[in-house]
């Protein structure tokens, strides 16, 4: 009796742990489309901090997405900014990779917006949050380049503020670089299957 109770509690704990990991910044989810049978992998947005170390705050977040029905060497990179801002489409995203600047244009004509309600209780307060985002097509080679580079900085052009920027090469907890590494490792496993 005690053993089955322990096993049930262990299983419930594992389910909660795995659910929490998928919901964390940089958490990875996988699914198979019932429509066309394609495999899909997505990453929750992870932080690009203002300066190295992860204690500087973050105006930027980034996520990756790939589907087996896409060309193998292409990924979707989504860039998020806190607040409601217009993000230009043409050459709005720049990566400075070890001194070499790469520019990207969005595949979206219009900036997308999302809002999340806050929650308030006697023990915690989570303020409401809004963000703006656009998607970019990037190559697998480029993602591997930024993961292997020594210094990578990101700049995203936005309407009223001109631009926001951050350090991609930071390995702090919840930052984009380690999340991108996990994403690419999992994607490589999916491709080999």
Image (cartoon, rainbow, N blue to C red):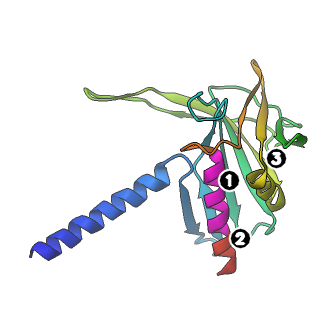
Q: Residue at x 77, y 42 (%)?
A: 152
* Residue 36 seen: no
| Residue topped by disc 3 | 107
- Position of residue 94 measured from the top left corner of the image (x, y, whole percent): 84, 38
Of residues 34 and 148, the one drawn nearer to the viewer in this rendering: 148
- Position of residue 72 measured from the top left corner of the image (x, y, whole percent): 79, 69
The answer to whether residue 122 is above or below residue 107 is: above
Q: Residue at x 67, y 30 (%)?
A: 51
Q: Which segment is the magenta one? A: 176-187
Q: Is residue 92 left or right of residue 175?
A: right
Mark before the other along the chain sequence, 2 or 3: 2
- Describe the element under mark 2 as helix, strand or loop: loop
Q: Is 180 within the magenta? A: yes
- Alpha carbon distance from label 1 to label 3: 14 Å
**Displayed quadrant of residue 39:** bottom right
Q: Residue furthest top?
A: 160
| Residue topped by disc 1 | 64
Label drawn at residue 68: 2
- Describe the element under mark 1 as helix, strand or loop: strand
């Amino acid at each position: 009796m005690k053993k089955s109770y322990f096993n049930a509690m262990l299983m419930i704990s594992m389910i909660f742990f795995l659910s929490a990991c998928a919901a964390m910044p940089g958490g990875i989810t996988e699914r198979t489309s019932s429509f066309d049978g394609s495999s899909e992998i997505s990453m929750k947005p992870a932080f690009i901090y203002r300066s190295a170390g992860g204690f500087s705050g973050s105006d930027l977040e980034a996520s990756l997405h790939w589907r087996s029905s896409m060309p193998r060497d292409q990924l979707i990179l989504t860039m998020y900014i806190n607040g409601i801002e217009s993000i230009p489409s043409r050459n709005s995203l720049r990566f400075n990779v070890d001194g070499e600047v790469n520019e990207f244009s969005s595949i979206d004509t219009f900036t997308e917006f999302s809002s999340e309600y806050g929650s308030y209780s006697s023990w915690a307060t989570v303020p409401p949050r809004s963000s703006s985002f656009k998607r970019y097509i990037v190559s697998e080679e480029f993602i591997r380049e930024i993961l292997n580079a020594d210094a990578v900085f990101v700049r995203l052009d936005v309407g009223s503020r001109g631009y926001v920027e951050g350090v991609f090469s930071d390995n702090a907890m919840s930052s984009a670089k380690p999340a991108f590494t996990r994403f690419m490792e999992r994607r490589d496993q999916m491709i080999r299957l």
